[in-house]
Image: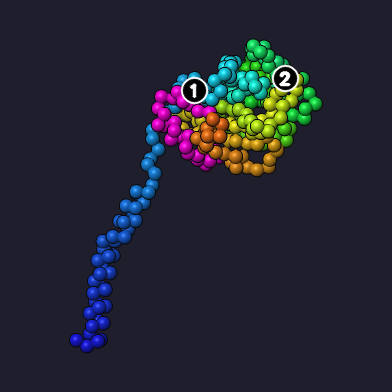
Amino acid sequence: MTKKERWGLIAFIILIIASILVTTEPWKRSTAEMRGALEPEAPPTIAIKWIDLALGYPLAHTGDTILTYTGFHLAYNEQFEQAAWVAYVLTRDEIESGTIERTNNFRSDTSIASGSASPADYRRSGFDRGHLAPAGDMKWDHLAMSQSFLMSNMSPQRPSFNRGIWRKLETKVRNWAMEKDSIYVITGPLFSPGDSLIGENGVGVPGHYFKVLVDLSPPDHDMIAFLLPNSGSSEDLIQFAITVDSLEQLTGYDFFSVAPDQEMIEWLEQRIEPGNWN
């Protein structure tokens, strides 16, 4: 066989192999199989009910006094003379029916046996009396609005924070409640060893604030958390979004620990889908 004939035979063999590959496309099957192996499992079927979360207070400081008001639940932290957290459900109906005017009747909370902070603690401090449960979320009821101005619901916030990015987040929460029908909201301060105190009662000035949001509307549920420093910022809110699981590690809280289906809750706590929150 001449050299030319050998090369012709090789070319013919290559052509036959190429024809087989085109017909069977084994690499496509392999890629598809690999893609299927790498893709995460489909989200589990989740059905979250408010009743399942209502008593699922963030577990951390067992000495905090738990109080129930018309529009929100509150855990009072005696050490820092303010709420450790507030929790409530915000619904589309509450927002649409909300016509109550802001009262601005800041006052001490007589429900705190040892005495709460007072408006005087903030005087000439340079800090705003920042709501944890916003007055804007309580416009659906006179008593709910009034109780939102109890000093137990106030926390020292820098004006650039309270009137800036924090107000922006509060407004977004109301927009999300309108869009999603109902949202479970948990808000609280986060302290560091170097944080200062103000007033005669020694009200702690938090270095950060957190907010946890749970979309309660079926069929799709979701969670997201925000952690913001107590300072003004022009950053987009999504820059401060973190998973609930990450927030638990930072704060020491255990959110939703009494929910019946912990596997589903943990799945939600470990993920973050900013696109679901516009």
Asked if the magenta segment contains residue 258, the reply would be yes
Q: Which residues are magenta?
A: 253-278
Q: Quadrant of the C terminus?
A: top right
- The residue tagged 1 is 56
Provide the secondary structure element on which disc 2 rests.
loop
Image location (x, y in percent) of residue 234: 68, 42
- The answer to whether residue 1 is seen in the rendering is yes
Residue 172 pos. (x, y %) = 61, 34
Among the 4 quarters of the image, the one containing residue 132: top right
Quadrant in which the N terminus is drawn: bottom left
Q: Can residue 171 be found in the magenta stretch?
A: no
Answer yes or no: is residue 166 visible. no
Q: Residue at x 66, y 13 (%)?
A: 114
Above or below: residue 117 compared with residue 162: above
* Contact (Cβ within 8 Å) of mark 2 with mark 1: no
Q: Which residue does the image show at 68% across and 16% down from the upper left?
A: 116
Colour treatment of the image: rainbow
**Residue shown at the point (23%, 83%) measured from the top left:** 6
Q: Which residue is depicted at the point 71% across and 30% down?
A: 196
Quarter assignment of residue 187: top right
Q: Which disc number belongs to residue 201?
A: 2
Element carrying mark 1: loop
> Is 269 above or below relative to 49?
below
Q: Would you identify the image quadrant in which residue 176 lies?
A: top right
CA distance for labels 2 and 1: 30 Å
User: Measured along the vertical axis of the image, is residue 53 above or below residue 44?
Assistant: above
Badge 2 local density, few (<14 within 10 Å), some, or many (20+)? some
**Type of the residue with mark 2:** Asn
Nearest the viewer among 88 and 252 is 252
Q: Amino acid at mark 1?
A: Gly
